[in-house]
Image (cartoon, rainbow, N blue to C red):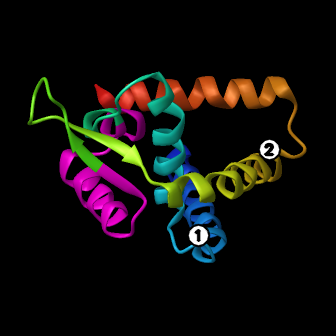
Amino acid sequence: MEKDCGIWIYILSHKLRKRMNESMQALGITGMQSRIMHYILVKCTNGPVFQRDVENAFGFSRSTATEILQLMERNGLIMRQCMKSDARLKNLIPTQKAVRLDAQIVQYLRDTEKYLTQGLSESQVSLFMETAAQMSENLDK
């Protein structure tokens, strides 16, 4: 049986998730938590970050984002602070623990990206990114 695009994406996703989880286990977080935490740390420098921002950035459903963010809050990685303008909105604030872990996470993400794309030219990586974006857009229709 010939492998189609969908199975290749699944294989890559599974391998990447496994590798990330193994690497982040020493820090006491999952690979996805590390990506979300880094996203929050980067975005909070420009203003408040809300759950819907995480949902949009990672393509999560509301329930999935809620589950991950609640676990991150219980693990002391983020705090939720009600906005004065609208108490229904809760700003996601990284804790000092998250700040301390971020340098290790950033280094891991860089190393993983280098490892993942080794042997590929810049144009191949760029084409992959364009292709993946188009496939994602196709699935949103």
Residue 105 on the magenta segment:
no
Question: What secondary structure predominates along the stretch shown in magenta?
Answer: helix
Residue 59 in view (yes/no):
yes
- In screen coordinates, is 138 left or right of 32? left
Sort mark 1 into few (<14), some (14-19) or many (20+) by Cα contacts within 10 Å. few
Residue 109 drawn above or below residue 82 = below
* Quarter of the rendering occupied by the C terminus: top left
Residue 2 in view (yes/no):
no
Please state which of residues 17 and 33 is positioned toward the viewer in this rendering: 33
> Which residue corresponds to the image point at 50% horizontal and 69% vertical from the top-left?
29
- Residue of label 2: 117
Q: Quadrant of residue 25?
A: bottom right
First to last magenta residue range: 54-79
- Residue of label 1: 18
Sort mark 2 into few (<14), some (14-19) or many (20+) by Cα contacts within 10 Å. few
* Between discs 1 and 2, the one toward the N terminus: 1
Q: Quadrant of residue 19?
A: bottom right
| Gap in angstroms between the C-alphas marked 1 and 2 | 17 Å
- In screen coordinates, is 90 left or right of 38? left
